[in-house]
């Protein structure tokens, strides 16, 4: 099957492309040519007709219509859009490929659910039951990151309009994948590193506020998430459906730290304290009564999705990569949910006295 991948060179994308090649598909990547990544020799790169200082593949998703002739010549059966961030992105895909491709698979996020805004206290007075299914309530407020930074991405990003455009398109059937918090080699968010750094620094304990320790989130290892994506591309019956992707079961913050500790041999203690004993800087400002766990039963049942890498091995690989690729700058605090070492030491001293 001919598959066109929009994006495909950052974090999750290379894993997806490699798995698609292993499944025997003919894969063409369309990107801006600004990311250096090693992909299988069988991968094709769609070359644009405009000059570029960095590469001959200069595909820019903001100008998809400029490449319509190349797309028509390629005639992909499935378009996999790894990076649809706005309604315009989605509409451009529909307008460009409606008479070219048979269907589109698009990457969305679990942040579409109302639970996300309950956690961030943009919605109050309710708690949504978890695990969240594909039919759970979505956010009522759009553009969840608008105003949080000057980045245009934060201003315009929202997966809800993306999903609405694609699912409602009558001339290009779509499959939507709502991804969890993804970890693994290449994770630019360095999700595990703050915990790992404390263990490598031989901290005697990690202090967690009680509700934070018990808070449950949805996670997915990058190679497993890639497998879910490739199944959605490969399986015609995925057409028209929305799927959650996540590990089973959901993991608490304390469980995640304990799992990392077991792998690295950290002998410290996870100390759980009530919010009243935390300094103001360490009190998590969100509503942690709301968990953020998604139910991936549908994709497991309908598409036969199973993890190809168990959680222990997934964490082990991620830990190895994290140690070899630490973030460029890490404050002692290291994570918005964690205390700095001075405050942590103060709490530990009080508990011993």
Image (tube, rainbow, N blue to C red):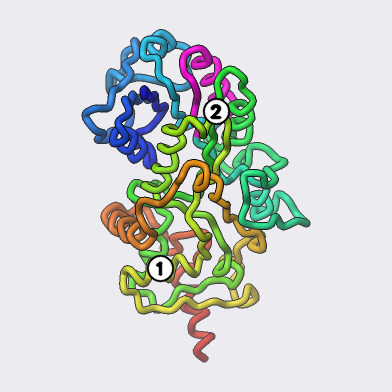
**Does the stretch in magenta take in 98?**
yes
Q: Left or right: where does residue 281 sit relative to residue 232? A: right
Q: Which mark is residue 152?
A: none
Q: Position of residue 340 (x, y in %)?
A: 47, 68
Check the image and name the residue furthest to the bottom. Answer: 353
Is 129 colored magenta in this rendering?
no
Q: Position of residue 155 (x, y in %)?
A: 59, 34
- Tally of numbered discs: 2
- Quarter location, residue 20: top left
Residue highlighted by disc 1: 259
* Number of residues whose C-alpha sits closer than 10 Å to that of mark 2, classed few (under 14), some (14–19) or many (20 or more): many
Determine the residue positioned at 50% across, 15% down.
96
Residue 86 point in image, percent of width and height: 57, 29
Neighbours of disc 1 within 10 Å: few (<14), some (14-19), many (20+): some
- Is 313 placed left or right of 167 in the picture? left
Q: Is residue 62 above or below residue 14?
A: above
Query: Reading the chain from its start, which is encountered first: label 2 or label 1?
Result: 2
Above or below, 138 relative to 59: below
Front one among 336 and 27: 27
- Is residue 190 shown above or below 257? above
* Disc number placed over residue 174 in the picture, else none: 2
Tell me where residue 6 sits by quadrant.
top left
Rendered location of residue 85, percent (x, y): 53, 32
The CA span between labels 2 and 1 is: 37 Å
Give the magenta range: 86-106
Q: Quadrant of the N terminus?
A: top left
């Amino acid at each position: 099957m001919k598959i066109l991948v929009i994006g495909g060179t950052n974090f999750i994308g290379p894993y997806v492309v490699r798995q698609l090649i292993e499944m025997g598909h003919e894969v063409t990547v369309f990107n801006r040519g600004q990311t250096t990544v090693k992909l299988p020799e069988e991968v094709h790169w769609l070359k644009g007709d405009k000059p570029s200082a960095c590469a001959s593949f200069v595909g820019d998703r903001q100008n998809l219509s400029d490449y319509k002739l190349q797309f028509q010549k390629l005639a992909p059966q499935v378009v996999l859009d790894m990076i649809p961030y706005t309604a315009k992105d989605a509409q451009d895909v529909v307008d460009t490929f409606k008479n070219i491709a048979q269907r589109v698979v698009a990457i969305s996020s679990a942040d579409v659910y109302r639970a996300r805004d309950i956690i961030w206290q943009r919605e109050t007075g309710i708690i949504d039951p978890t695990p969240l299914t594909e039919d759970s309530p979505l956010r009522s407020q759009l553009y969840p990151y608008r105003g949080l930074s000057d980045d245009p991405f934060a201003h315009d990003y929202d997966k809800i309009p993306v999903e609405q455009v694609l699912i409602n398109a009558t001339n290009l059937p779509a499959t939507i994948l709502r991804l969890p918090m993804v970890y693994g080699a290449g994770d630019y968010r360095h999700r595990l590193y703050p915990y790992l750094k404390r263990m490598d620094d031989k901290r005697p304990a990690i202090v967690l506020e009680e509700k934070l320790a018990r808070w449950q989130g949805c996670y997915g290892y990058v190679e497993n998430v890639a497998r879910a994506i490739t199944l959605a591309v490969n399986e015609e019956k995925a057409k028209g459906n929305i799927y959650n992707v996540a590990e089973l079961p959901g993991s608490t913050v304390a469980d995640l730290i304990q799992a990392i500790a077991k792998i690295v041999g950290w002998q410290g203690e996870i100390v759980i304290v009530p919010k009243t004993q935390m300094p103001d800087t360490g009190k998590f400002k969100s509503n942690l009564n709301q968990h953020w766990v998604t139910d991936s039963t549908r994709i497991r049942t309908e598409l036969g999705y199973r993890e190809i890498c168990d959680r222990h091995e997934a964490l082990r690989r991620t830990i190895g990569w994290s140690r070899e690729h630490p973030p460029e700058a890490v404050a002692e605090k290291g994570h918005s949910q964690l205390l700095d070492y001075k405050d942590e030491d103060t709490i530990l001293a009080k508990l011993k006295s």
